[in-house]
Image (tube, helix red, strand yellow):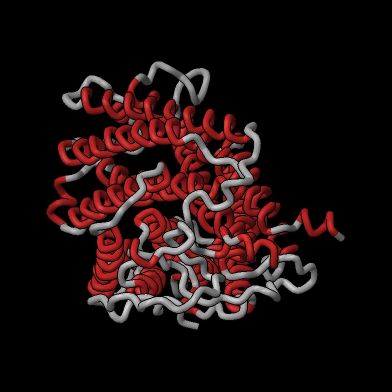
Amino acid sequence: MLQSSLRTSHKVVGLRYLWLALVSVFLGMIMSLIMRIQLMWPAVHFISGSGVSPASYSALTLLHGSLMVFVVLSCAPQAGFGGYFLPTQIGASEMAYPNLSRIAFWITVASVFGMVAAFFFEPQSGLTLWVAGVAVFCVAAVLNALNFMVTTIDLRAQGMTLPRMPITVWAWFINAILSLLIFSILLATCVLLLSDRIAATHFFSAAALSLGVPASSAIPAFPASWQRLFWFFAEAQVYIAVLPCFGIITHLLATFSRRPVFAHRAVVLALCAVGLLGFCIWGEHTFAAGMDPNSPLVFSLLASSLGIPASILLVSWFGTLWNANAKFSTAMLFALGFVSLFVSGGLSGLFLSAAQFRRAAQGDDFVTGHYHLVMGVAATFAMLAALFFWFPKMFGRALDERLGKLHFWLTFVGVYCLFMPMHWLGLISRLRHPANDLTAIFATHSPYGSLQTLVTFATVVTVAAQGIFVLNVAMSLVRTPQASRRNPWGATTLEWSSMAAASQVSHRSHITSHLVIHRGPYEFLPPNLRFGGDDFVPQDSPTPALPPTRPTAFGPGPEPLGST
């Protein structure tokens, strides 16, 4: 019984997701480096022995995007960190369905193997295998989403009301609802597409959509239905990646600033708005798919409305940092790096909304730079911040701060030198290359060769800098556990509480029976009210009531200190 419990423990499953994501992110970075070298020096045949074909280069791009989007950006912040810490942050000892967590993980592994194996097949059979891998991944994502929702709703400890849940729990919960919606749609879409490819059906063909046209007619495929269903997922996937990161960054900024979250309730509402609007803007990029001519206005207004919750989050982050006694640990630096990247990528997104600007930026480099800044790299910074923050809790050892800060600065400078020049390349490029004209695509003798060289050099430096991180993790794992530093950051939430850890001994009931929550998640003390040398009050601490927090412009702020 005990061994079975250990195998299905939410902490074990969460760590497995993180290790899978770690392997995937390094494979993805290696592939991005190969693509940059191939663009700069076409004579170097990494992809095939005799040359580069459009199919092989596109397949490598597809594999890179699949690992980064599905495994790294979808699994790591939600199933990895969320699966490990969500139960402990709400006072539960396990997920609602622990066996379901383990099943979902191995289904995810099978899907990753399928998507990677598709790279080594012929294009037609490889695409079929890739779609099957995506469908299997969707099954695991739906199972995880259901598990997260039930755990958050049903297994909160006594006194853990909704206003007392940490921002991270809110982010994981909202993200689970959004994941259930979009991965269900993508799963059904992939099943229909596999039916078209294997069983010769016509769900996404012109014969199935045109009146009076026999199915046997030689009519090319009509992808409008596929585009509409696919964009239900693809547009919302951006927010699947960044929603947990919003929660993690808000959590870390409050912890290292030693201040409550500024406009706490407004932040929760902003996260809800991001999840809702993120699902409703699916038609933003499907204007040429036979939709109503008025639909662009509706979807554009919904997409523009996302600027409101994003602005609330930025105001909260800067309000939390304002006049704070911040501790600039490596985790805090990566959190601040996320804010910087999010702002930079968001500003470039505003430029893309202008039609005249889109015509000026004819190349796809501008879009690539924008997408990586606001989604890929920013989310990676949030995950690195979370790893440096929770590493002592997961392994009993802290990562080396000197190596961590060196890793941060090299990575921070590297990604800006990598993706900001891509914006410039997109602006100044006036060449439209045919899709299959690899000679034009890989041309290095151009007026913009210096920027291409800078991008390639920055890619090499950024990838090489991750070796410092690997060395840091390896050195930390062989150290003796630091049992005396149970809560090195002075955090207030339950995963760091010794009382909560001692209370989680139930084997059949997943609710912590002896744990009672007395207060909100972010209560830090000013110098004149500190007691026992600590400047924070854990959520399960039954200390006497303290003066309430000052109301903010967004409402009354967090719950009063000491309220029950």
Would you identify the image quadrant in which residue 188 lies?
bottom right
Most foreground residue, 505 or 450: 505
Residue shown at 46%/57% (left/top)? 533
At a point 63% along the width and 45% down the height, the residue shown is 483
x%, y% of residue 505? Answer: 75, 65
Q: Nearer the viewer, residue 367 or 314?
A: 314
From this viewpoint, is residue 529 visible?
Answer: yes
454 sits left or right of 534 in the view: left
Q: Is residue 306 left or right of residue 564?
A: left
Q: Residue at x 25, y 43 (%)?
A: 366
The residue shown at (63%, 39%) is 117
Pick out the residue farthest to the left.
356
Tell me: 422 left or right of 399: left
Image quarter where the N terminus lies is: bottom right
| Image position, residue 118 (x, y; %) | 60, 41
The location of residue 259, given as percent across then percent down, is 35, 62
Position in image of residue 127 (x %, y %): 56, 46
